[in-house]
Amino acid sequence: MDTRGASVSTSMSEMTIDAAHPGAAATPVDHSLTLPSRPWRRWTTPWSAIREHAYKGSGTEIDPFVVDWLPNDVEDPYNYSVGYKWTCTLIAATGTLAVTMGSSSLSGAIHGIKAEFPGYNNMVYIMVTGIYLGGFVLGPFVWAPMSEVYGRRMVYVVTMAPFTALCAGLCGSPTITALLVLRFFAGTFGCSSMTNAGGLISDMFRAKDRGLAMGVFGAMPWLGPALGPIVGGFLSPISWRWAGAVVAIFAGILALLHLVFLPETYAPVLLRQRANTLSAETGQVYRCVYDAAKPFSTRELIKTQLKVPFILLFTEPIVFVLSLYLACIFSILYLQFTSFPIVFQGERHWSPGISSLAFLGTSIGCNVALLYMVFWGNPAYAKSLKQKGYLQPEARLPSAISGALLIPVGLFIFAWTCSPTRIPWIISILATVPFGGGMVLVFLACTNYLVDAYLPTAASVLGASTVTRSIMAVVLPLFTVDMYDALGVNWASSVCAFISLAFVPVPFLLIAYGPRIRRMTKHGREADDHGLEIAASRAAAIAANPEADVDANEKWGTVGEDVRTPIHEIEDPVSQNARAQAPGH
């Protein structure tokens, strides 16, 4: 947490008299409370400007002064330079790459682990990969509320160093039990990067500028797992421990970069600190704009984070079905870490390093789909939104239709070309390209759809989806070896294709019946009404000021635009603008 000084200087050269608020005329202002410049805090706003600004309110418990960013406030993350924003984005995204690469790095070195710790059931060795994802189940319940209470930077500070230490520690594991325990906690601490990085990017970039940055970050959860087996496969002839050591070295470098360069970007935390300091200095009541309607409660936040995701998962059919769909796709990806060695090492007799290159097909497909969404899909959606003013959440789903069809096509081709070995190997690897592309198209479309359809509870909806996905990615791969032994390579691989085929109708059905289904449930109905209110507010604002750049106003909370201010606290923007221009404001 940042502090602005422990004492108030008595030097008259550092004092001014505040005339901004009635009753505070005799209050001295300590300009030494200006935040000091640091590598992770490049720009600071003079405390005199903060203290002397005319805030809305009267400074009482009933009507507190409402603290918001000053005009052109350099501490507002939206006002960081483009170069600095991208420096932070690349550091955060690469941190996510390290964490997700760590999830699969040992899958390419399983033979070495079996040789050093022989005599265990196959499920135990598969759990070396799976238990890391178990940490992905627990971690979000800790780091998500922590980031909202203490900020993004604090979460990075308290997690990246332990993640590095745990990755280094597992390299020296004397037993398989120690290896599993360390892997679990490495996943728990490491997943903070996945829960935090997207928020950090949203804090800095306005929605209309965010597409490319989110695309870079969005590539990492898919690119990392594909690179992990390649690293492990080529290092396993030296020692399986080197597969973990490379991740530890990578994570250590990134932990240092996070510590030195990543700023605090979460606006509620920054403004809450500013409001608390103003209150302590003046004796009057200041409250940040995010807490103006309802005081911030850590207890309520944690309660919401723990309870609401499960309520939504089991009471909203759309949330349940899409969470299950995404979980199955994610599980198939992690199932490949066990099935590919069976196919390419067992059937084709490739070395661990060469067989790990088979994951490049999935990686290429993922990145092609991401480029498509960043440079065509998202801009097309944004253009349509701007023209029509409001789009149903189902407008996000056309790309999911393409993805839903590509996934089973790729999996079926892979299933029946991976064996016998007389079929050229390149065909089965090329078959994983449509799987990777379809996986990303479905994931991005369904995630955006869930956010738009349940905007007031979007964080909880995504939390429910993440937990479901991680649990299934832990459990389903445990049965891979037994399934391949019982069914053979072709039919076992086809099982995944049949599972994905069963979900192909989902995007079609949601486009046709999604609005009707949402109107039948409590949270869906409330979210729909809320979306219509936002659309009406946006239309009224455009009618009042047709020349306004509505895409640049982050406080309107319009679907597809900036939603940094909690949407349920936003009033009509027309009346907001009128009040801002009224005398006394």
Image: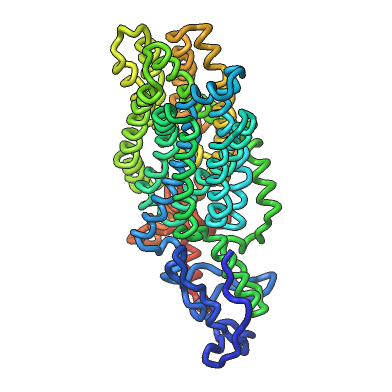
Where residue 405 appears, x then y in whole percent? 38, 21
In the current view of this chain or complex, which residue is farthest to the bottom?
A: 12
Q: Is residue 76 above or below residue 205?
A: below
In the picture, measured across the screen, residue 537 lies left or right of residue 216, that is right
Task: Quadrant for residue 441, please give it.
Answer: top left
Q: Is residue 397 visible?
A: no
Residue at (59% x, 76% y) in the render: 5
Where residue 459 appears, x then y in whole percent? 56, 44
Q: Is residue 285 above or below residue 540?
A: below
Residue at (51% x, 78% y) in the render: 47
* Viewer-closest of 24 and 351: 351
Residue at (57% x, 84% y) in the render: 29
In the picture, measured across the screen, residue 269 lies left or right of residue 381, that is right
Q: Number of marks in the image?
A: 0
Q: Is residue 299 visible?
A: yes
Where residue 559 appears, x then y in whole percent? 45, 47
* Viewer-closest of 144 and 556: 144
Where residue 502 appears, x then y in whole percent? 48, 17
Identify the image quadrant of the N terminus.
bottom right
